[in-house]
Image: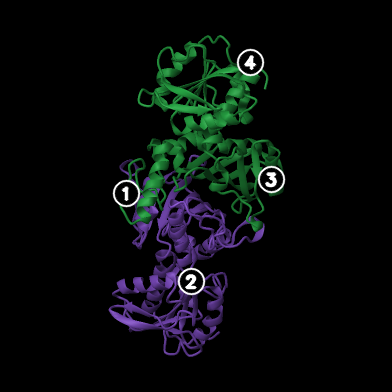
Chain colours: A purple, B green
Amino acid sequence: MKGRAMRVAILGATGQVGREFLKVLETRDNFPIEELRLLSSSRSAGSEIEFRGKKIKVIEVNEKAFEGIDIVLASAGGSVSKQWAPVAVQAGCVFIDNSSAFRMDKDVPLVVPEVNGHALKNHKGLVANPNCSTAQLVVVLKIMHELAGLKRVIVSTYQSVSGAGKEGMDELEKQTKALVNEEPYAPKKFPKQISFNLIPHIDSFAEDGYTKEELKVIYETRKILELPDLPVTCTAVRVPVLVGHSESVLVDLEKKVSPAQVRESLANSPIVEVWDQPEEGIYPTPIDCAGEDPVYVGRIRRDTSSENGINLWVVADNLRIGAALNAVRIAEYMVANSLVGQKVTT
Amino acid sequence: MKGRAMRVAILGATGQVGREFLKVLETRDNFPIEELRLLSSSRSAGSEIEFRGKKIKVIEVNEKAFEGIDIVLASAGGSVSKQWAPVAVQAGCVFIDNSSAFRMDKDVPLVVPEVNGHALKNHKGLVANPNCSTAQLVVVLKIMHELAGLKRVIVSTYQSVSGAGKEGMDELEKQTKALVNEEPYAPKKFPKQISFNLIPHIDSFAEDGYTKEELKVIYETRKILELPDLPVTCTAVRVPVLVGHSESVLVDLEKKVSPAQVRESLANSPIVEVWDQPEEGIYPTPIDCAGEDPVYVGRIRRDTSSENGINLWVVADNLRIGAALNAVRIAEYMVANSLVGQKVTT
């Protein structure tokens, strides 16, 4: 990566994705960081977090917190982003936001760099990171679209509890421990028991019986792929898995292609791994993919219900490609393309 | 129910579904039983099982075991059924088989009584009980077909470990206990870790990258609905749930119908319960449905990817409607329609 070393702030540094930002940045040797500032609410300020062998104190976010910063990586929820994004942009930062607050704003690029990095060129300081389920999906769909043209996309998700943050992971762990010891553990974070159960309800219910999570997959997919009329539907389900989102995806295509052609096209992507020798037990599962960067695809086969459909099974670490890793890749792309530190006029 | 009291044998009485047969029979007050004979392999013979307050000794299945019996409820695997079904039929029994051994045989009715009970009229002694995922699905599909005509069916399953019998349940329980105590527990029954994980692999892999489980859903659905060319596809996934199979189902229909019309039609079925007030947290999850008889349907909504599609979420107890309950209902239907104790010529 070309460009000077960056001054980076993490907003929401003590949260689940905030900590994942740190893990990802530790491994990005070609992303030189001159300064790393860790920001949080007053509740979490004062704690210390280690990064590249040095302890950094977490400070409370305030009006002056973004001064001198080039890039803000934010994952502190929609209301925090709404409050601080304008302040950071005003201070000259690029604000890369993991919340859903700005994703559908037409002036805000919604980006997976390998899919639509070009959309960053017209940024106005604010960039949105897609929903976790969407990010891994569009990586696959983009390749399928280039191969044979997307006609219709049908997704059923199997989403891990880490999509609901550290509290979600805690609830699955504690509830499971209680249940195996035959003790009760009432749901707090999730609307129903998640341990040994499934919940077809992620985020709140919105229009026409869909959850916001399902609508995010539908609308964000169309925006990122720049196919505003693409027929997409989604059923989003929370499953008792700690890390890693899985998706059963049926893609109707314009042209007939073989599973072998799909495998070849997907394998050509630097961020996809095809694990698809099912007779030898080779297909991805969430525990294989947790902590890993690629989008894993298996179970690639002809749809038995249409002429040109393909069924796929897509698994990825929702905290990485679905959150922290994608945000860091956006930052890297912007540095490499000299899109950071411009004067932005709004 | 009319008809005389029946002499019933359970083959595989000590297995997961065998025990569920006993639980279901206990509750069917209008199914008079004159004699209940419990049959098993030599390994499990000799144990005693209580039924309606009386202890019954489990005896080893042999050439004479079916004499004087009217109805055999079998759930001891395909090879056991292949060995003993002809013997039982020769002895004048109706043999209701829960294995997949005979399901696609054109001379064997494959039946969910509420869907295609009429197919029992031409039985030749042998009747097949469908795959668990199929049984709950066709109950819903039949109603949708009568309402608006099925065009295409796309299913992603979330199947509990009890579909793999008692060993499956033991493995999830023991593996989870080990993992929460930070001890290792290698997979035995399942091909990979099932605790805190998902496995997109149920039964063995067959043609074109599909598992046998997925092909069962496809072929059995067509046979039961008597729609041999119905476009159906399925992705079958094992989830860390003890009892209760869930399905994300997209149904493309010939005619446009509203979610309200679908809800009304489904609610009219005596064996379906519609739980669909999502804003109030009313939708089915597996732990709600375990131990219950109905097929539960929620999340009924217009498909956002087609003109006339409907999305649904279908949950049922796989040991009941998916196995023991459906077999007992087949027996009841046959008794009520004087289809038991006929001389069968093959």
Looking at the image, residue A344 sits to the left or right of residue B206; the answer is: right
* Location of residue A216 in the rendering, given as x and y in whole percent from the top left corner: 55, 63
Q: Which residue is mark 3?
A: B263
Pointer 3 or 4: first along the chain: 4
Choose mark 3 or mark 4, whichever is in front. 4
Residue B295 located left or right of residue A76: right
- Could you say where residue A294 lies in the image, as x and y percent from the top left? 36, 60
The answer to whether dots 3 and 4 both sit on one chain is yes
Q: Nearer the viewer, residue B216 or B54?
A: B54
Q: Are marks 3 and 2 in contact (CB under 8 Å)?
A: no
Q: Amino acid at mark 3?
A: Arg
For disc 2, the neighbor class at 10 Å (few under 14, some 14 to 19, many from 20) is many
Query: How far apart are the two marked residues, 3 and 2, measured between alpha carbons?
Result: 37 Å
Mark 1 crowd level (few <14, some 14–19, many ≥20, 10 Å Cα): some
Chain letter of disc 4 in the image: B
* C-alpha separation, residue under disc 3 versus residue under disc 1: 44 Å
Q: Residues within 10 Å of mark 3 (few under 14, many from 20)?
A: some
Q: Secondary structure at mark 4?
A: loop
The mark that comes first in sequence, 1 or 4, is 4
**What secondary structure is marked by label 1?**
loop
Residue tagged 1: B185
Mark 4 residue crowding within 10 angstroms, few (<14) / some (14–19) / many (20+):
few
Q: Looking at the image, is mark 3 or mark 1 nearer the viewer? A: 1
> Is the Cβ of the residue at disc 1 closer than 8 Å to that at disc 2?
no
At label 4, the amino acid type is: Arg
Q: Sequence order check: which comes first, mark 3 or mark 1?
A: 1
Residue A65 in the image, given as x and y percentages of width and height: 46, 87
Q: Chain of mark 2?
A: A
- Does the image show residue A262? no
Name the mark nearer the viewer: 1 or 2: 1
Residue for badge 4? B4
